[in-house]
Every structure is written in C-alpha cells, then in structure tokens.
C-alpha cells in the first residue's frame, strides 16, 4: 500500500497483473513497435537495414495487388462472418432446447473447433481436390466435377466455406451460454400474452443476445480478417490471387519474396484496417444496443 | 489469502517470467561456450526429406568418429527451408547447425549470413576439393570472396515417362517436342472405371509454373535468346514471342484436359503422387526420382517408369540430348551456430568421394563430384547415369540471380495461370507482368533492354 497525496493506493493488484502485462509487452507490443520501425527500412531477414522512409508505405498504397487483397479480405470477412453467425446462432437456438442426446449433439457440433486448423485444412484440401471425394460424389450424381481450388470463383467459396465450418462453433458456444442463462419467466410471460415463437425471438431473445453477439462477432471479425492458415494451405492465395487475403499477401511479401520491410508495412496496414473495422462495428453495435 | 502471501506469489511470478525471458534471449551462453569444445549431443539440420534420405547409412560412421550423440533433420518444403534458414540465421544463436540451400533460391545477401568455409577447408580439407567440383557451382555459392556452401546434390531435370501407358495407347516414346505434345494428348483418357489419366502435368503454383513455360519455350525455340522470363543479361522477355507461344501451348493443353485441372495448386509432392499412382503419363522432374518411381514399396508404377530427355523441336539440329533446366543443393552452416566445427566435420564426411558415391548408388542422390558421376560402378548401377551426364552438358539455369527473383516468378506465374485459365489473353497477361518485373529489376539496378 502506498500513499500518494494523502490517498492510499493499493499496489497489490498491479503486482498480480504485472506478469501478464510483461508477457503481453514482450510478445505483442514490442513486436508491433518493432514491425513499425522496420517498415521504414528495406531489408531481408538477417540482412543489413537500409532506411527508405515512407517508400514501403507509398508502394503498398499504390500497389493494385494490395488493394485487391484489401477488397477480397473485406468480402471474405463479411461473408464468412455472416455465415458463421447464422449457423452458430441456428445451432445455439436448437441446442438450447432440451432433447435426448443433447450433450452428444453439442459435442459433435463444436468438434470442428477442437481439430487443429492445419490438419482440418489439409484434409479439406484432399476432399476439395479435383480428384477428391466431393467431386466423386458429384460425378455419381451426374454432376460435372468442379475445380473447387483451382477456379478463382470456387476457390474463394471453398476457402470461405472451410473457414465458416472451422469457426462457427466459437460463436455457437458464446451464444449458447447466453441463451441458457436467459430468464425463462420472460418467455413464459410473452407466451401467456400470446406472442408467437418468431415474436418472442425478435423481441426477447435477439435483444438479450446482442451483448454476446457483440463479443462473439468482435473477436471473430478480428481473427477472420487476419486469417492465414486456411487460405495459405488450400490455395496459397491463388489461383490468380483470388484468395490472396491480406495476411497471405503479407506472408508472401515478407517470407517468400524476402522483403521484410514491405511485409512490416503491410502488417501495420492490416492493424490499422482491423482497428478501423472494429471501431465502425462497435459504434454500430453500441448504437443499436443502447440508443435504438 | 494474506498480504504477505500475495507479495510472495506476485514476486514469484515476476521472477519466473524474467528468468524465462532471459533464457529465450540468449541466456546460457557460458554453457554453450563450454559445449563448443565437446561434441554436441545433437547436431540439427534443416532441409528436405530427400536430404535426410541422401545421408542414410552414412551417419553412423560420423557419430563413431566424432562422438556426436546423434544427427537430426527438420524437414520442410523447398520454400519453407529457405525462409526457415533465413529467419533462424538472424537470431542471436541459430537453433540448427547445418542446412541445405537450392541454387535457384539463394541470393548474395542470403549467402552473407552463412559461415565462410575457407578456414574450415584449410583446417579440415575435403579430399579432391575444389578440382572434383564444378567451378560454376562453387562460384554460385561464393560471396564476398569466401566460399559459403558445398554443392551436394545435383538437380538435373528429365522427362519421366510411364512406358506401360505408352504401350497401352500404342504410341512410341517422343523423339521431338512435336511428338511429345501429340503423345500428351493421346495419353489423356478416362478408363472404364472412371479413373482419369493425364498426359502431362507439373507443380504449377505461381512460383513454379514459369519453369514449365520456360521448358516449353526452350524446346520450341532453342536458338532464341528470349525463351526465359528474364534473360541472362537481365532483359525482361516474358512478353516476347517464344514465351507467349509457350503459354498459348500450356493453355491449349489445359483446355484439352491434358494438364491436371488443379495444376495451379499442385506441389511437387502432389504431382509425384499422381505419377506414382499411375494417373500421370509424363512429368519433367528431378532425374533421381527414377529410383523412387521404380521402388515397389513406394510406387505402383515400379518397373514401368523410364527417364528420357524432354526433346527439342524437330527443326533443331543439335547434338544436345534435350531440354535441361538445372539447379543444385548445397550444404551450409549458419554464421550464428555454436557447433560450426562439428557441422563442418559432418559436411566434410558427407562430401567425401566415398560418401557421394554411396549416396548416389543407394540413396537416389545425384552426386555433384565429377569423380562420382564418372565412376564405373555408378554408371553400371544407376540406370540414368549416362543420361544425367549428357543432360548436365546441356543444362541451363532458368533465372539469373537477383533478389527479386521470387517476386518476379510470382508475378509471371500469376500471369501464366490467368492466361491458362482463359481469364485473359497471353499477350495481355504477359504485358502487365513484364512491366511489374521491369520495375523489380530497375530497383536493383539490373535492368537492361
């Protein structure tokens, strides 16, 4: 306990959070600052650094490949999040009703989250290959095989689908926890007043779910915007950059083209874009929750 | 919990964290210094699975001679090997002791991070060095006047053919490029059980598909200076006629179903798997794959795979046996390892004439020592020894060395894939790519027109 200007300040909480703060500083904040520093240099990993000022940023902003990545990442994030939420919400609503084998079903539905991203993506890659099991089933049904991974349009759909499959359980779990903790009296009262199921959902369930939705979508939006493993393992950003999302573009620039300075600039670009997106989303959600 | 207990717990957490961080960022240097004089318990290498295979049967003698505990390999794909080596050689202390680098993926600034080897050669010489090695290879791995790597594995490409499929379709092995194209069409068919056979394919990711195009361009226009993406004198030639013709041919083959539909996402492992399962008739790849393709434990086409040269166009009168892009792998030691002495001893052991011959005879490793290539036993035992020797004479390097090579390959590859898929014409795709590649060469002060 310490006295400052006559007030007693308790230092123990600060002492107890100090380890995690130090850890975060070491593994998050320092690398962010270091990346910002290196973004003003031209260098390859392990090489001499040459100061180039804002050149990496000006090239990034004038590079059509970067803007293609921005656009595709935005479309991927929005479409992927929408389906993650709808599927997660749907399953959460289903699972919140009591029925036989409910726990088994919950375990099965959240199993995609338990599988390693890399393992799951590699297996999806085999399934989605032109000679894979999905095209085999299509051909048995008399449908022409589809180039799921080597066609620009279908590669985007494939990557989005695998991402939705992998991450909807996270949203489902958050919404499910919120659903089962809602007071049953509200629904009973509404039912007594003659509200239909849809009216109960719109007027009671959904508004009460907004705080959980805010949390779930905030986290998922940030992680989906930065998604790397799935597009890289399935398509390496191709074909013809159809799935060249920002994280893939950054990795390729820094570790395939060995342009670490430019890669750092892209990393900071991703950070600012994520921040902007988060601010826009949070403002909209808060407005919806507390004003509307 | 009492206040004193809170203090103790908090201080314990902080101290533990600081000790951990200290160890990560270079603690234990005194221990590491003491270990330099003693053989390490583990000598770690970074490379491809073929490198570990190449050393099979040779390590025990090294362990017995030096007292090193064991040798371990971390194996990766080709791209990951170089990015791993580049990253880890920039750390205060490298977590690996030796590695393998491919000539096409090494550039001067990367070489600057490798341990100079001349002093090690003076202290522990390699027998027959440098006479028994290619001067061109040694020059390619020399930086700032110092040798930085030792060539260990030749990568001469040849055309692997499934002769059973040729027999099944009633056609002869191609002797000209025109016959090769016709054969590729004829060998593309579907069996009664629905299995689709492809006449030809390649690992066609953006960074690799330019190789396919350059092989075709070289075969169709062998006397042209413009059959590369970037010429040896740093002119951008992707939008010149030979490359455009080659891309047009690739597009026709793709539209006809000769090339696998997923070629643009296929790694070399995907293509070799296709070949080993009998669904691919022809593939240009490392000549040493002949042993793997004919190993009954690994391949269902064992006994049916032959290797020939990718032939030139019928109008080209030459003594060269065929189109041969080439690269080579080299041993390197990171400049920041503490086990440089024992890493060098391992490299010296694996680079000896006996080891290279053993590796060539038993482990499907193409030697880089002239004496091993010319060895009678090697020529007698290795079915493709003579062809490898002939192809080496005709070998060319696809890309001149420059730092932006990887990015240039990516740009060219995406343009080729766009044209192959029919998204744009070869002319439009290559014109845009040419502009982007010119900017890269201009940045490095290399562009010449």
Image (spheres, rainbow, N blue to C red):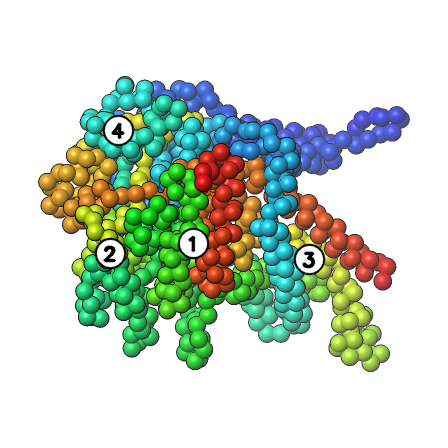
Residues at marks 3 and 2, CA–CA distance in whole angstroms:
64 Å
- Name the image quarter holding the N terminus of chain B: top right
> Can you identify the residue that label 3 sits on?
A217
**Which chain's residue wears label 4?**
B
Q: Secondary structure at mark 4?
A: helix
Query: Where residue B269 sits in the image (x, y, percent)?
Result: 35, 54
Which numbered mark, 1 or 2, is in the foreground of this view?
Answer: 2
Toward which corner of the image does residue B168 lie, by quadrant? bottom left
Tell me the residue that label 1 is attached to: B205
Badge 3 marks a residue whose secondary structure is: helix
- Between circles 1 and 4, the one closer to the viewer is 1
Residue found at x 67% / y 70%: A93
The reply to the same-chain question for discs 1 and 2 is yes
Mark 3 vs mark 4, foreground winner is 4
- Mark nearer the viewer, 2 or 4: 2
Q: Which mark is residue B166?
A: none
- Which chain's residue wears label 3? A
Question: What secondary structure is marked by label 1?
Answer: loop
Which residue occupies the foreground of this view, A171 or A265? Answer: A265
Residue B356: name its quadrant: top left
Q: Are marks 2 and 4 on the same chain?
A: yes
**Which mark's residue is nearer the viewer, 3 or 2?**
2
- How many residues crowd around disc 1 within 10 Å: few (fewer than 14), some, or many (20 or more)? many
How far apart are the alpha carbons under marks 1 and 4? 35 Å
Point out the tag, 1 or 4, that comes first from the N-terminus.
Answer: 1
């Amino acid at each position: 306990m310490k006295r400052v200007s006559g007030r007693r300040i308790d230092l123990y909480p600060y002492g107890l959070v100090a380890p995690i703060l130090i850890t975060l500083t070491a593994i998050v904040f320092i690398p962010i600052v270091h990346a910002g520093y290196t973004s003003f240099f031209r260098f390859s990993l392990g090489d001499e650094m040459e100061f180039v000022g804002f050149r990496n940023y000006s090239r990034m902003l004038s590079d059509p490949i970067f803007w293609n990545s921005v656009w595709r990442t935005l479309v991927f994030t929005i479409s992927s999040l929408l389906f993650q939420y709808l599927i997660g919400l749907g399953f959460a609503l289903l699972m919140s009703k009591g029925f036989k084998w409910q726990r088994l079903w919950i375990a099965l539905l959240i199993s995609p989250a338990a599988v390693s991203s890399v393992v799951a993506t590699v297996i999806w890659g085999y399934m989605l290959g032109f000679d894979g099991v999905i095209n085999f089933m299509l051909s048995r049904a008399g449908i022409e095989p589809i180039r799921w991974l080597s066609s620009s349009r279908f590669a985007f759909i494939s990557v989005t689908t695998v991402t939705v499959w992998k991450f909807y359980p996270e949203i489902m779990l958050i919404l499910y926890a919120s659903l089962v903790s809602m007071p049953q009296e509200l629904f009973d009262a509404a039912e007594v007043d003659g509200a239909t199921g849809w009216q109960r959902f719109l007027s009671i369930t959904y508004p009460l779910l907004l705080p959980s939705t805010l949390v779930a979508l905030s986290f998922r939006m940030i992680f989906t915007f930065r998604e790397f493993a799935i597009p890289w393992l399935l398509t390496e950003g191709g074909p013809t950059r159809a799935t060249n999302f920002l994280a893939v573009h950054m990795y390729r620039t820094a570790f395939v083209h060995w342009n670490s300075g430019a890669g750092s600039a892209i990393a900071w670009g991703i950070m600012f874009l994520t921040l902007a997106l988060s601010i826009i989303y949070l403002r909209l959600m808060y407005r919806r929750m507390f004003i509307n | 919990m009492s206040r004193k207990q809170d203090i103790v717990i908090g201080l314990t957490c902080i101290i533990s964290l600081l000790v951990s961080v200290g160890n990560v960022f270079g603690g234990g240097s005194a221990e590491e210094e003491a270990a330099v004089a003693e053989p390490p318990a583990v000598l770690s290498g970074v490379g491809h699975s073929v490198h570990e295979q190449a050393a099979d049967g040779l390590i025990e003698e090294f362990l017995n001679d030096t007292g090193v505990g064991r040798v371990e390999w971390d194996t990766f794909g080709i791209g990951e090997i170089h990015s791993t080596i580049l990253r880890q050689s920039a750390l205060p202390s490298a977590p690996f002791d030796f590695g393998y680098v491919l000539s096409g993926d090494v550039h001067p600034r990367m070489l600057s991070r490798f341990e100079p080897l001349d002093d090690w050669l003076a202290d522990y010489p390699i027998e027959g060095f440098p006479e028994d090695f290619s001067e061109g290879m040694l020059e390619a791995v020399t930086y700032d006047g110092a040798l930085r790597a030792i060539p260990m594995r030749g990568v001469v490409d040849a055309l692997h053919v499934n002769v059973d499929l040729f027999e099944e379709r009633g056609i002869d092995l191609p002797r000209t490029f025109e016959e090769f194209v016709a054969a590729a069409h004829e060998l593309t068919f579907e069996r009664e059980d629905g299995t689709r056979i492809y006449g030809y394919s390649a690992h066609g990711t953006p960074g690799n598909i330019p190789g396919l195009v350059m092989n075709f361009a070289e075969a169709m226009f062998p006397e042209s200076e413009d059959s590369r993406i970037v010429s040896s004198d740093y002119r951008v030639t992707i939008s010149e006629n030979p490359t455009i013709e080659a891309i047009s041919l690739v597009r026709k083959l793709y539209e006809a179903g000769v090339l696998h539909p997923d070629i643009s996402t296929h790694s070399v492992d995907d293509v070799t798997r296709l070949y080993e399962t009998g669904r691919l008739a022809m593939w240009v790849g490392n000549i040493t794959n002949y042993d793997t393709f004919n190993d009954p434990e690994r391949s269902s086409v064992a006994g049916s795979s032959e290797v020939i040269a990718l032939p030139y166009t019928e109008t080209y009168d030459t003594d060269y046996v065929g189109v041969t892009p080439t690269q080579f792998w080299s041993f390197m030691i990171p400049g920041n390892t503490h086990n440089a002495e024992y890493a060098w001893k391992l490299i010296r052991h694996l680079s000896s004439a006996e080891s290279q011959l053993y590796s060539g005879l038993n482990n499907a490793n193409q030697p880089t020592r002239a004496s091993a290539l010319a060895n009678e036993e090697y020529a007698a035992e290795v079915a493709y020894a003579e062809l490898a020797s002939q192809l080496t004479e005709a070998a060319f390097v696809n890309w001149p060395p420059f730092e932006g090579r990887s990015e240039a390959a990516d740009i060219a590859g995406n343009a080729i894939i766009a044209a192959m898929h029919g998204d744009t014409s070869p002319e439009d795709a290559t014109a845009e790519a040419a502009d982007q590649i010119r900017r890269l060469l201009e940045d490095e002060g290399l562009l010449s027109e």
